[in-house]
Structure formats: structure tokens, C-alpha cells
Amino acid sequence: MTNFIADIKIPDSKLAVEAAELLREHSDDLLWNHSNRVFLFAAMKGNLNQMKYDSELLYISSLFHDIGLTPAFRSTDKRFEVDGANAARDFLKSRGVPEDSIRLVWDAVALHTTIGIVEYKETEVALMNFGVGYDVVGKNFDLISAEKRQKVVEAFPRNRFKHNILHAFLEGFKHKPETTYGTINADVCELLLPGYKRPNFCHHVLNSKWDE
């Protein structure tokens, strides 16, 4: 893999390489390419805004952000984002990474779909969320030039990504749809999971055991 893509250096420390190898081992091309694009778009945003960020931690967060969808790391009862965050924490802990850095990566992975909150967290956490939003729904699409987008997609192809990613999401949590309650992932279940009925918060409030 080339070290620089669209003027962004792919981290190549021992820690970064081991994280990349772990994702490559347990994911398919869809998640591998997506995770790398997320890092590149996130780093571009950071550079455009002249933000100081830890490239290695941003890269590792990006690599782990969807690993909770994979068979090796998905749980039976937790949100897939938490599964990914826990996997990242175990990986970093086993390699003696400082607790503050571990916490940062955990937050970046666990909160990456928590729209309206995550963008106000630490720089790496907010940037990773930007990369996810950029690659999945094209949020702030014109912020990055067509030329740079093309270089990223040439290195890490989309291959009908906008259609395939929804099925990848569902595959990761169709056995535990209750974990998507109150999140954007419930939209995926509603669209693709036969018989799924989205829980309603107002119903829970009005039908609680409280008298009033």
C-alpha cells in the first residue's frame, strides 16, 4: 500500500500496521476500503482546518469503527459501536498504550454514529465522525475537492458502497435489533429486516408502570 494518498500519509508505525492487519484479517473489502477512506477524509478535514490531531490514533479509530459488525467481534447484546470500541480498547491495552489514548479511541469508535454530540468531542473523535459522515452520506461533500476524492476512491474503491453498506450494517446486528433502539441503525432494521417494528419512545413513556 502506498504511504501517501491525496497528500495524506497512512500511518505505518508498528501499532498502526498491526491494527490494519487485524481489520484485514477479520473484514471484507467493503469494510476495509470504507475504514481507510474514513481516515483519509477525516485527515483531510483536519488539515484543511489546520487542526492538530494524532494521525496514528485517528487511523486506528477509523480501522476499528465498524469492526463490531464482523463475526469475530460482534456480541449478542451490545451496540455494534460498543463492540468495536471494546475491541479497540483490548487491542491497545495489550500493547501498553496509555490510558488517555485508549479512552480517546474508545470514544471515537463508540460515539461515531451519535450525531449531535460526537462532533463536539476531542479533535480525533470529531474528525473520525466527519470521515464517517462524509463517506456514508456525503455530508459536507464539497468540502473536499473532486480531484482528492478521486484519488481516495482509486486507492480504496467504493464498489456500490451506498447499496452494500446497508446490508453490511444489518448483517452485523440483525440478531440483536433491540440494540438499535434510539439510533440511526433502527432505520436499517426498518428498511431491511422483515417484521421489524421500530420501538417508540413515547409509547414507553406513556405505558410505563408509573401512575402519572
Image: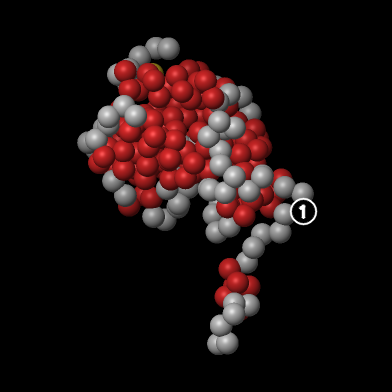
Residue 41 lies in what quarter of the image? top left
- Residue 144 appears in the picture as rendered: no
Element under disc 1 = loop
Left or right of 94? Residue 149 is right
The residue labelled by disc 1 is: 195
Residue at point 58%, 68% (across, down): 201
- Name above or below for residue 90 compared with residue 33: below
Here the colouring is secondary structure
Q: Quadrant of the C terminus?
A: bottom right
Tell me where residue 4 appears, x and y as whole percent.
Answer: 35, 16
Left or right of 162? Residue 145 is left
Left or right of 34? Residue 193 is right
Give the mark count. 1
Identify the residue at the far front of this view: 94
Identify the residue at the far right of this view: 195
Which is nearer the eye, 16 or 132?
16
- Name above or below for residue 9 compared with residue 85: above
Tell me where residue 101 appears, x and y as whole percent.
Answer: 27, 37
Residue at point 65%, 41% (across, down): 170
- Residue 89 appears in the picture as rendered: yes
Residue at point 50%, 21% (across, down): 24
Residue at point 43%, 40% (across, down): 86
Tell me where residue 182 appears, x and y as whole percent.
Answer: 55, 59
Q: Quadrant of the N terminus?
A: top left
Which is nearer the eye, 81 or 11?
81
Amino acid type of disc 1? Gly
Identify the residue at the far bottom of this view: 212
Tell me where residue 99 appears, x and y as whole percent.
Answer: 26, 39
- How crowded pointer 1 is (Cα within 10 Å; few <14, some 14-19, many 20+) is rated as few
